[in-house]
Image: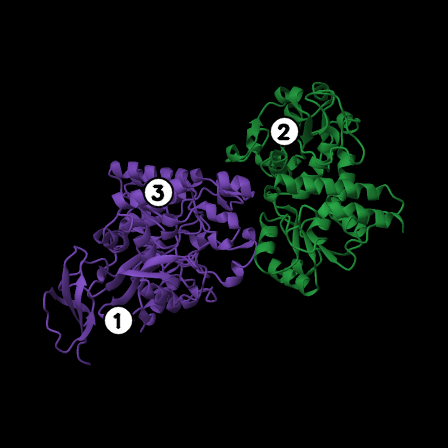
Amino acid sequence: MSETTKTLLRGARLIGGDSADVLIEGETIAAVGQGLSAEGATVIEAEGQILLPGLVDLHTHLREPGREDSETVLTGTQAAAVGGYTAVHAMANTFPVADTAGVVEQVWRLGRESGYCDVQPVGAVTVGLEGAQLAELGAMHESAAGVVVFSDDGKCVDDAVIMRRALEYVKAFDGVIAQHAQEPRLTEGAQMNEGVVSAQLGLGGWPAVAEESIIARDVLLAAHVDSRVHICHLSTAGSVEIVRWAKSKGWNVTAEVTPHHLLLTDELVRSYNPVYKVNPPLRTEADVLALREALADGTIDCVATDHAPHPHEDKDCEWAAAAMGMVGLETALSVVQHTMVDTGLLDWAGVADRMSFRPAAIGRLAGHGRPVAAGEPANLTLLDAAYRGVVNPAGFASRSRNTPYEGRELPGRVTHTFLRGRATVVDGKLT
Amino acid sequence: MKRHLISAADLTRDDAVLILDTAEEMARVADRPIKKLPTLRGRTVVNLFFEDSTRTRISFEAAAKRLSADVINFSAKGSSVSKGESLKDTALTLEAMGADAVVIRHHSSGAPHRLATSGWIKGSVVNAGDGTHEHPTQALLDAFTMRRHLAGAADGGPTHHRGPGDGTGRDLAGRKVTIVGDVLHGRVARSNVHLLTTLGAEVTLVAPPTLVPIGVESWPCEVSYDLDAVLPTSDAVMMLRVQRERMNAAFFPTEREYARRYGLTGDRMARMPEHAIVMHPGPMNRGMEITAEVADSPRCTAVEQVTNGVSIRMAALYLLLGGNEPALAPSAPADKPARTEETSTP
């Protein structure tokens, strides 16, 4: 066994605002304090940089198995590390679908082999995401992958009885159903947010009510069976109101918002550039502001990327033919800084809460979303918040380039990421 | 004018009047024994049709041929497109063959916009109907038809201006146009609202609420659910085709109920002002949105619209391709009568 590696982060700014030295020994934080000894340690001058707990993503599409042309577990976790993530939840809509213990274990194992970021597989709620028959949720939970979060993401569990049963069933092992809230009949042929812009562009409308009606139903179902439901990528002001109401009742409801829904609006669709095509669609300015406010006041629990890589040809075409989704892992923290921190809505403690503590708690992830304190696992992200840079997808670690931020100036840059004490990113570069 | 014709919303009043005036010049050619101008000799116009539309395609084909352009018809059916070729690769192929203009009909809203802005081709793009978005040459031919009938008329007056030249230089200021039918899925209504408003007309859309898009309040027009209420003040009533299949998606209960509430019958036509015209872009569903009595009446301009369509498309192609620079100077029509004269003595 080799000697325990030591790393000293000197003068990092903690989320409380104080500066301190942080000594990492092996896989854990050995000490946090002033003037710690650098003896035998690799020293990183972190003066002025913000030290966050390693970020946790509840909603990532790693595409493997099946669509390795757009992303693999390796490239996806590399992108995650560059973005400051130490754990990601891999969504189940792969080919084959992650609806059996075998597939979730495969994804889990690929994550461990990658070494860049922990991969926690999400299991499908129903067989083949078909919404008809429950997948073997218990088997996936008991597998090596230890699945806790179940989702048919990409498709809505629209059958009320199936949703009720799923919510009830996962209570046996403290699971959670993460719902992609999209009433299918109301969104047939949907291409973008239904409203003023869709009326002008002649694109099929994806109405807010198609999301809100499912959320309303599901919070009521969760309350009825006393289980917990998590709302994926909440995108409308009306959805915020429903979740706020459900939480006021004390029901076990959590919700996430994507970075792109915190920044972009459906006005961008006027370009007919499919890089802006995403599901749920970009909404209006009023929705964006409501989402920011809800993330700030905690109605929305966390930011989740919905990182959705697609090959170039699936976006280099006419709008209707294009795939839905955007990559997001490598820009998420910058977008949150831009929309939440630089606007004064959230401080860095809030960012740590919404991007690490709470998502880890929802996913019941051990070893992640822990405070920066002695004895804790050394899952850490060091951010240069003063940095300003223009997004250039050519430099992405992700295999895909479908970012809506190309050419846009965004603040902040992750300089270092540590996964259990090992640096996965040093000076902004993968190790 | 811009280099492409994608949306009626892109046209200024002067652009639109220029196209209509140019079309009047083109219409004169049709009255000659030899209906051909040498203007676009050596230029290549591709009709790129991803959707079946014989009427629109042959109209563009006739227009291009009357301007002496070489015409290539590319239909998605039976072509490489049906084998999975992307719009991009099709475009690159056409570019490699030297297309000067691509007339595109596509089932996806925004496809012409993508074609024009993605750098796939250098030529001009003419939107011949995209999804449920726009159909700008249809709106232009409708405006052209209206101007011939209504431009010179005093408010509510009976004056009909038929024949070449009438209305030249004028717009549709103060004319009241009612468009009836499937606004939600219709690209004709969308283009007409933009163009007719630009030309000064007041547009009212009439449809069951299910066939009016959410967000219509941002359009520069009125919306009514009551056809009978707006007929007495309409100078032109445009009936849009309503697909019978729409009732299967619960947009309206039955064909008969639609016809009763929103169809134009002889009785309803009698409530229109005497000078008012009935328009239809075709193809008509007789007995659905329009009765045979109305369709065959002298007040219905459906057939005239087809004729005018060729003139309008000649004008559009001429203005997009005929000038030496991408943005045509307003002086362009001034030298055109001369060209017209040249060809009158073959």
Which percent across, then down, holds residue A130? 46, 50
Which percent across, then down, holds residue A60? 37, 58
Mark 1: which amino acid? Ala
What label sits on residue A154 in the rendered view? Answer: none
Label 2 resides on the chain identified as B
Closer mark to the observer between disc 3 and disc 2 = 3
Of all chains in the rendering, the one displayed in purple is A
Q: According to the image, label 1 marks what residue?
A: A423
Q: Are marks 3 and 2 on the same chain?
A: no
Residue at position x 23%, y 51% in the image: A347
Which percent across, then down, holds residue B46? 72, 56
Q: Residues within 10 Å of mark 2 (few under 14, many from 20)?
A: some
Q: Is residue A311 left or right of residue A369?
A: right
Mark 2: which amino acid? Thr
Label 3 resides on the chain identified as A
Mark 3 → mark 2, Cα distance in angstroms: 43 Å
Front residue (pair A256, A173): A256
Quarter occupied by residue A139: bottom left
Front residue (pair B121, B161): B161
Mark 3: which amino acid? Leu
Q: According to the image, label 2 marks what residue?
A: B254
> Quadrant location of the N terminus of chain A?
bottom left
Mark 3 → mark 1, Cα distance in angstroms: 36 Å
Q: Residues within 10 Å of mark 1 (few under 14, many from 20)?
A: some
Q: According to the image, label 3 marks what residue?
A: A289
Instruction: Name the residue at the bottom extreme.
Output: A2
Q: Secondary structure at mark 3?
A: helix
Drawn colour of chain B?
A: green
| N-term mark: 3 or 1 | 3
Q: Secondary structure at mark 1?
A: strand
Is the residue B122 above or below the residue A205 in the image? below
